[in-house]
């Protein structure tokens, strides 16, 4: 087989490395995450391999025409075709992939300050801004560059057989509770009141074998309106009034700009529960009262029901 250069490109966490290993097993593989250095540092390595008659696959982001230019020029100089395999993974799917990778590797969802430290030694540990930056600067590959372009739609792999549990992911404010004072969010446990019909419905789902988990945004922690301990006490009071106990994870960070994976609609809290407790996406339902809850559910790959409809059914 004649030698070729193949660029597998797309968002960070698009699945490029797995795709390259699966579909180009006989090609020599060059990847900046493994080799270090810059994209330009890979060009002489690719040249040496192609000069030996080897085909080379390079799985990197290659977000701009300029980032691809040297490899296209190399192909022309050596007389070998240059292919661009564009993984059309959406930014939402890349977010899920990035978070899943973190949870599987570190056993948790690292907060922004920890991600900064991890990123110094792990190129796969990064925050949402990396994907936002890629989206902003991305220039789709075209034949005009001298590339043969192949577009590959994203397809998420099925969960393994161990992912068998069904669950409810539950928002809290406006879904399970309100405040007695009329404030938008509680900062004092004594201000918490449970909304009608919540306990009875949740008990029914528990009898049917569902697990319960809470997922909540608590941006007031970052604003200084309440502390993280205050937020936990309000959750404990909510659960006590429901007569139920279940694990609740919450995001204490600023709403904007988003620097963390845990603020809904980012999928971090949901993916962490899916992975830790081996939840079946097809049998997991997010219940919330806002558009961010619905978007969160879509990104996690689980169903969504609005709280009003869910608790009145």
Image (spheres, grey):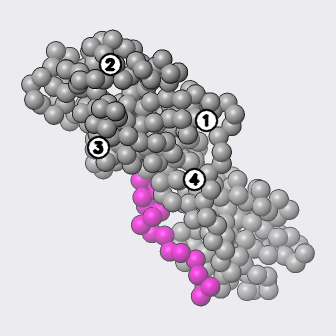
Magenta stretch bounds: 129-145
Is 213 in the magenta? no
Q: Identify which residue is drawn at 79% across, 75% down.
A: 4
Q: Nearer the viewer, mark 4 or mark 2?
A: 2
**Label at residue 13:** 4
Q: Could you tell me which quadrant the C terminus lies in?
A: top left
SS at mark 2 in the image: helix
Number of callouts: 4
> x and y percent of residue 21 in the render?
76, 56
SS at mark 3 in the image: loop
Q: Nearer the viewer, mark 1 or mark 3?
A: 3
The residue indicated by pointer 3 is 290
Q: Identify which residue is drawn at 46% across, 19% down.
A: 206
SS at mark 1 in the image: helix
Say if mark 4 contacts mark 1, CB within 8 Å.
no
**Label at residue 60:** none
Q: Is residue 133 above or below residue 108?
A: below
Q: Earlier in the sequence, mark 1 or mark 3?
A: 1
Q: Is residue 33 visible?
A: yes
Say whether residue 71 is left or right of residue 220. right
Q: Could you tell me which quadrant the N terminus lies in?
A: bottom right
Q: Earlier in the sequence, mark 2 or mark 1?
A: 1
Say whether residue 200 is left or right of residue 148. left
């Amino acid at each position: 087989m004649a030698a070729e250069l193949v660029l597998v490109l797309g968002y960070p966490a698009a699945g490029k490395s797995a795709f390259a290993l699966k579909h180009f097993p006989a090609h020599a593989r060059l990847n900046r995450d493994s080799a270090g250095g810059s994209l330009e540092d890979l060009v002489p390595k690719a040249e040496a391999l192609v000069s030996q008659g080897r085909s080379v696959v390079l799985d990197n982001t290659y977000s701009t025409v300029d980032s691809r230019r040297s490899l296209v020029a190399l192909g022309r100089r050596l007389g070998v075709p240059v292919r661009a395999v564009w993984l059309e993974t959406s930014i939402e799917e890349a977010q899920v992939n990035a978070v899943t990778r973190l949870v599987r590797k570190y056993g948790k969802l690292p907060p922004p300050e920890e991600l900064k430290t991890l990123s110094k030694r792990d190129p796969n540990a990064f925050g949402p801004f990396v994907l936002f930056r890629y989206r902003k600067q991305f220039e789709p590959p075209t034949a005009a560059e001298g590339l043969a372009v192949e577009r590959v739609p994203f397809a998420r792999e099925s969960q393994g057989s161990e992912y068998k549990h069904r669950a409810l992911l539950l928002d809290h404010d406006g879904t399970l509770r309100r405040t007695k004072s009329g404030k938008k969010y509680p900062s004092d446990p004594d201000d918490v009141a449970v909304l009608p019909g919540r306990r009875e419905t949740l008990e029914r789902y528990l009898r049917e074998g569902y697990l319960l988990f809470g997922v909540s945004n608590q941006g007031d922690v970052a604003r200084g309106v309440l502390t993280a301990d205050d937020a936990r006490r309000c959750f404990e009071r909510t659960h006590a009034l429901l007569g139920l106990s279940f694990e609740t994870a919450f995001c204490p960070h600023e709403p904007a700009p988003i620097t963390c994976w845990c603020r809904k609609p980012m999928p971090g809290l949901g993916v962490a529960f899916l992975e830790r407790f081996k939840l079946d996406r097809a049998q997991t339902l997010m219940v919330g009262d806002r558009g961010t809850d619905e978007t969160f559910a879509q990104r996690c790959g689980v169903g969504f029901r609005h709280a009003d409809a869910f608790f009145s059914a």
